[in-house]
Image (tube, rainbow, N blue to C red):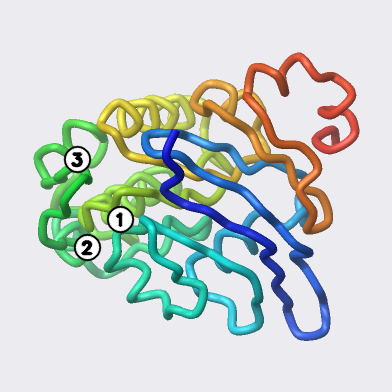
Amino acid sequence: MTALLTVDGLHAWYGRAHILQGVGLTVGRGEVVALMGRNGAGKSTTMKAVMGLLAERRGRVAFAGTDVSAWPPHRIARLGLGYVPEDRRVFAELTVRENLEVGRQPPRAGAPLWTPDRLYALFPNLAEMKDRRGARMSGGEQQMLTLARTLMGNPSLLLLDEPSEGLAPRIVQQMADAVRTLKAEGLSVLLSEQNLGFAAAVADRAVVIEKGVVRWDGAMAALLEDGDARRAYLAV
């Protein structure tokens, strides 16, 4: 499988705290990879470092055959890397419809083309509240809107940070269905996740991180069979 995203020797700091210590991973075209680990393991930091959002980072990030290690976030996004942060950054005073328009980008070669109508079909909840302001939406609805707005940029790879955290089981199921649909459309996804059930339902492969170091990398089915690895790196 051709790698769409390659991360090699990635280090990152918050002040003096050395959070990532040589992280390496790949995401193939059309592949869903779950970056897993406990709270504080470095999952969200990895996402931010890949996206160019951390000032203090070192290592190589290649996306779509281009070295983007020193690029600013907006240039990386324009190349087709979408980022959905865990803190649901919707525009509170804009409606669902207006939030989606903010994210609109031209069609991108080799990536699925998303329109508001296609996204309303993917997220029926949003279709029922097109004129509702972001501030009047539940956390789960905001999570869906954040993802949908990112998809309006027609990315070829999506960084999805903690998509199931804090959501009701019904919304978690809808998010899992959405990720499977995105994969069927040919979109590549790197998601950070603590929920093993969610990750197992959507991911082809898992990369397990602990204290900023990759400890396990392999097929999701193999992780489900590896009780020792799950106890060592995922058990709370």
Q: Are marks 1 and 3 in contact (CB under 8 Å)?
A: no
162 and 51: which is toward the camera? 51
Q: Amino acid at mark 3?
A: Leu
Q: Assign a secondary structure to mark 2.
A: loop
Q: Assign a secondary structure to mark 3.
A: helix
Please tell me whether residue 52 is drawn above or below residue 205 in the rendered image: below
3D distance between C-alphas at marks 1 and 3: 11 Å
Q: Amino acid at mark 1?
A: Thr
| Relative horizontal placement of residue 185, taking residue 223 as reference (left or right) | left
Q: Which residue is mark 3?
A: 119
| Relative horizontal placement of residue 171, taking residue 111 as reference (left or right) | right
Q: Residues within 10 Å of mark 1 (few under 14, many from 20)?
A: many
3D distance between C-alphas at marks 3 and 2: 12 Å
Q: Which quadrant holds residue 120? A: top left
Q: Are marks 1 and 2 in contact (CB under 8 Å)?
A: yes
Q: Residue at x 85, y 19 (%)?
A: 227
Disc on res. 117: none
Q: Which residue is mark 2?
A: 103
Q: Which quadrant holds residue 206? A: top right
Q: Which residue is mark 1?
A: 150
Q: Assign a secondary structure to mark 1.
A: helix
Q: Amino acid at mark 2?
A: Gly
Q: Which quadrant holds residue 23? A: bottom right
Mark 1 or mark 3: which comes first in sequence?
3
Q: Residue at x 26, y 55 (%)?
A: 149
Residue 53 percent location from the top left of the image:
52, 75
Please tell me whether residue 125 is drawn above or below residue 76 in the rendered image: above
